[in-house]
Amino acid sequence: MAAPAVSSTSGAATKHSSPIKPSPAMINPRIREEWSKFVYPHRNTEISIKEMLEKLCPDHSGQDLWVKRSRNTTKRPSTFETDQWIECLNQISLSIKTDQDNRIVFAKPGEKPPDGHPTGTKCRPDIVAFKQHSPPNFNMDNLHWAHLEATGEIKSSGKSKETSGAQAAGYTSYHLQARPDRVSVSGIWIKDQLFRIFFTDASQVFHTPQIVFRGAIAGQMLFAFVWSLYHPQLDRSITINLDELPPTFNVRVGSDVYRDLKLAFTGEAIGRRTTIMMEPDECGVVIKEQYIEKGRRFAEGDLLKKIHKKGTFPGVVRVRTYGPVTKKDPITVTHTLATGHSITRGKTRLVLEDEGTLLAKEKTIKRLLMCIYDLLEVIRNLDKHRQILHRDISMGNILVRKAPRSGGKAFAKDLDDMCFCACLLDHLGDQEYEPSLEERLHSDVLLTDFDSGEDKDPNNPNITHIPQARTGTPTFMARVVRNAKHFAAFGVLPPTPPVHPKMLSRFEELLPDRCKKFPAGTKEELILQRQEKEVLPTDFRHQLRYDAESVFWFLVWWSLLAQPGDGSPEELIPHSTWSTLTGPEDLRHENYITSDKNLRLHSAYKPLFYLLDAMRQHLLVDSELCTDKMKQEPEYLIEVFQRLILDFLIENQGKAFMVLEKSDEDRRVAPDASAGVSTSNSVTGKSISSRSGTHRSSAYRSMTHNSIGNSTNTSVTSSMLPPPHPGSSSTTHSTSDSPLPTRPIELRSSKRILANQARSTLNTSNTSAGTKRSFQEVDKDPDPAQSESPVRHKKQRPLDPPVKSNSAKNQPETPPTPRRSTRRRRSDE
């Protein structure tokens, strides 16, 4: 049957405003406990028994018939052990389908969890339902997530009702991720003689109140639950092939059928429910499916069509066909809030012509930085030539092409002022080399996932609504976007960096306008932003520089996680370093921008610190607040970042750390010493116990931005200090005036005095107004893998300056190692 539109009413009021959700720390999608703790308690909606019956059996016309049958077939078990519950459910299934072929059977999965989940999870439901004798080679030893028809959770004495219910919700969501052919799935939660039925689709996890197993209502609910497994809500354009494992899918798009597709990626089940299926061929098509909220986003297909309309736009994924998924009617899911507002998501499908691997998995710094330069080149020219902003630069949306571009249109002819990193670095110093347009526009980077994108052209006929101003993945979002305010700041913004002398002639030849528009050696600018400046939603629009800042956060994220693959000793990421980057409250400004104390990379990659430090100094203040008109140019921050990256690549060419491959396993996060309990690495899934020291390992699997959030975000505290860490009873801070930010070019003494005077003036002014703001710097515990005990020393002096772009001949062979922070330590870390 065709999948109908489904709806419900939520029992709790929900504010419908920004698409940025209060996000948990970046969770590991394969660990059920993290979903249960951070995600599903907020995604569970209790509905009435009548509403659940309508969801389970929306098209059933003979309701009186199955109500009568439920009275005769649903028998109350004599005891309420797990085996008796399973026998009861199997009796109901037998009453619906008497022959054994494809009868749904309920059973315990045994000690071995189901295999083959796209996230790699090893969680094990307490009860599973599957079709008997299908496929013929099926047995409990090779139980696959794709075999399942339903899941169940048995509440144990050690779990609270909320935790157990969230785990039941987690099982149904894992089930939905493994079955792109299903619009919804259902499950059951059991405790003694109590049970609840769960129903999950892309809009929400719905469940009934606790039902006591006695009387007609309980029998009707259980019968409807089992009956719905024989009549699932399907996307009929997708068929699953279970003859081989992992399963493959056939997808019909119009008159075309794409066969033997493999499930390559799946995002969070609740929300957009992004699913990626790929052909087995190296250069095959990629099918991307999502449930897009209507009236909230631009159509991704329309944006990609415009981008490539004049010819292939390099660095952007190409689209073959796109549109809503329909059979007779569009496939939609609806969630109605208590306020009466309904959120409807419709299933869309894009057939893409390019595929790649995540840039987040790139092995070497050299290759990573070349791709980062190219990514910046793509987003600046998308804005300049197509008036399109991506607005969600994050780890899941940046790919590296698997194979060279083939077929399709030639490159667009209006991109003659575009040039990628390889062309600039190849033949460096060869004055006679004149690259062709193909050579200038060759890059392996691929930017994808434009469903949060914005077309700034007001005359575009496809624009049917005002775009959400604040959208993206919280960890990678620009601070202004995430918090809707400019942070208070003081200090000196560095001058525009020069083009490296070895690159200058090539740069002036290929990109002459940039040298004229952004001349090097501009004056430093003293910034004195006394108070946080709120950005009103009516005044705010996304800017190109915000996408550039997202690129910076991606580079910080990759750099912190990089563990060398040459057998170097493991160095844990300090817990505070990771939590301030990925936590639900945005603490990045005071921990990564006004200070460099959290740029704690693995010592093998320590020289990369100098590039990150130089980049973050240009983010001290949003360029909108600068008085220099050049800094207010949309492309200014991108130009700065590209020059710094080129400088770093040239200065460190041939050095070992540039080609040192990182391990497939990311660095682990140290435990929170104040909590005294085991914590898990939210990316790698490795857990480290602060009591026992044991850990479990699991491979990294990337998440889409929906896993982190899409709604209003809690703003950062007005203090420049982070709040006490969750789980700690008290926090002691050692404070002092923080030194001026480290700068790529040494400040002259007079300017140091000027900045110190400005800072003193600011503190005095705030004190007289009764709003004293202490600009404090709190240093974290040293990496437990590198230091045995904290030592207190004198006041920290600024770090040595990083690599300078115009002094290659005087540059030491290896950049100096940054000094370890020596301030008094936080007692809770």
Image (cartoon, helix red, strand yellow):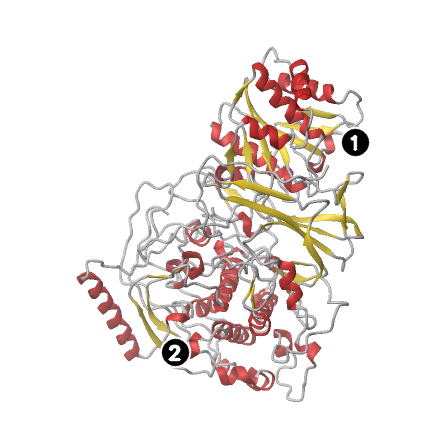
User: Which x, y percent locates residue 765?
Assistant: 21, 65
Residue displayed at 56% across by 48% down: 684
How dense is the environment of label 1, judged by Cα within 10 Å: few (below 14), some, or many (20 and up)?
A: some
The answer to whether the residues at label 1 and label 2 have Cβ atoms under 8 Å apart is: no
Helix, strand or loop at label 1? It is loop
User: Which x, y percent locates residue 141?
Assistant: 73, 31
Question: Is 411 on the left or on the right of 716, as rendered?
Answer: right
* Residue type marked 1: Ser
Q: Earlier in the sequence, mark 1 or mark 2?
A: 1
* Residue type marked 2: Asp
Q: Which residue is mark 2?
A: 628
- Pick the residue in front: 13 or 626: 13
Number of marks: 2
Q: Which numbered dot is residue 574?
A: none
Instruction: State the separation of the CA atoms marked 1 and 2.
Output: 70 Å
- Pick the residue in front: 442 or 415: 415
Q: Which residue is mark 1?
A: 134
Question: Is 371 on the left or on the right of 16, as rendered?
Answer: right
Helix, strand or loop at label 2? It is loop
User: Which x, y percent locates residue 374?
Assistant: 60, 70
Please tell me whether residue 691 is drawn above or below residue 782 in the rendered image.
Answer: above
Question: Is 67 on the left or on the right of 780, as rendered?
Answer: right
How dense is the environment of label 2, judged by Cα within 10 Å: few (below 14), some, or many (20 and up)?
A: some
- Pick the residue in front: 370 or 254: 254
Please tell me whether residue 176 is drawn above or below residue 251 in the rendered image.
Answer: above
The residue positioned farthest toward the bottom in the image shown: 432
Please tell me whether residue 416 is drawn above or below residue 625 in the rendered image.
Answer: below
Is any atom of residue 695 visible in this view?
no
The residue positioned farthest toward the right in the image shown: 136
